[in-house]
Image (cartoon, rainbow, N blue to C red):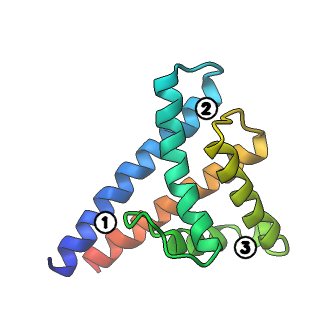
Amino acid sequence: MSDISMLSARLDSNQDLLSAFTKSIQYIQTKKKSDEHERKYIKNVLSSILFALEESLNNKISQNHNIEGRSILRNLQSLNTTKYKKDWNVYTQNIISLSKKINNDDLVLKTDEISILNDIAEALDNECDQIFNRMHG
């Protein structure tokens, strides 16, 4: 597979994941009750990214090869340099805690947890932009 094909496949995968991730965040914010199928879908979408980030934060190789945890973390850190510069370690611990919470089927999220998910969505969006630019640069 050529470099452009690999980048194109990665961009397509990331865009699909970003779309599902943002829809899941919106759903959590607007719906107070959901059926079991919806909860399972939302948990799987959010967990897939959060677990990849958690693995990267723990210096483990990601089990999900479709998600570049380290790259998303770099984007997340650059987005949040002014916001979390002094508290990056606390912020990353909050990501890990959020990952565990969602893994335990707890989808009742606080405002700061929703904020973290929105930050991650923005970082994933930046990842998509970077891949697109590499393809056309």
**Of 57 and 10, which appears nearest the observer?**
57
Residue at horizontal 32 percent and vertical 63 percent from the top:
11
Q: In which quadrant of the rendered image does the N terminus lie? A: bottom left
Circles 1 and 2 in contact, beta carbons < 8 Å: no
Please tell me whether mark 3 sits on a helix, a strand or a loop. helix
Specify the label residue 10 is tagged with: 1
Specify the label residue 81 is tagged with: 3
Specify the label residue 72 is tagged with: none
**Front: mark 2 or 3:** 2
Q: Amino acid at mark 2?
A: Ile
Instruction: Say which residue label 2 marks.
Output: 28
Chain-order first, disc 3 or disc 1: 1
Residue at horizontal 50 percent and vertical 76 percent from the top:
61
Label 2: how many residues lie within 10 Å, few (<14), some (14-19) or many (20+)?
some
Is 95 placed above or below 112 here?
A: below
Chain-order first, disc 2 or disc 3: 2
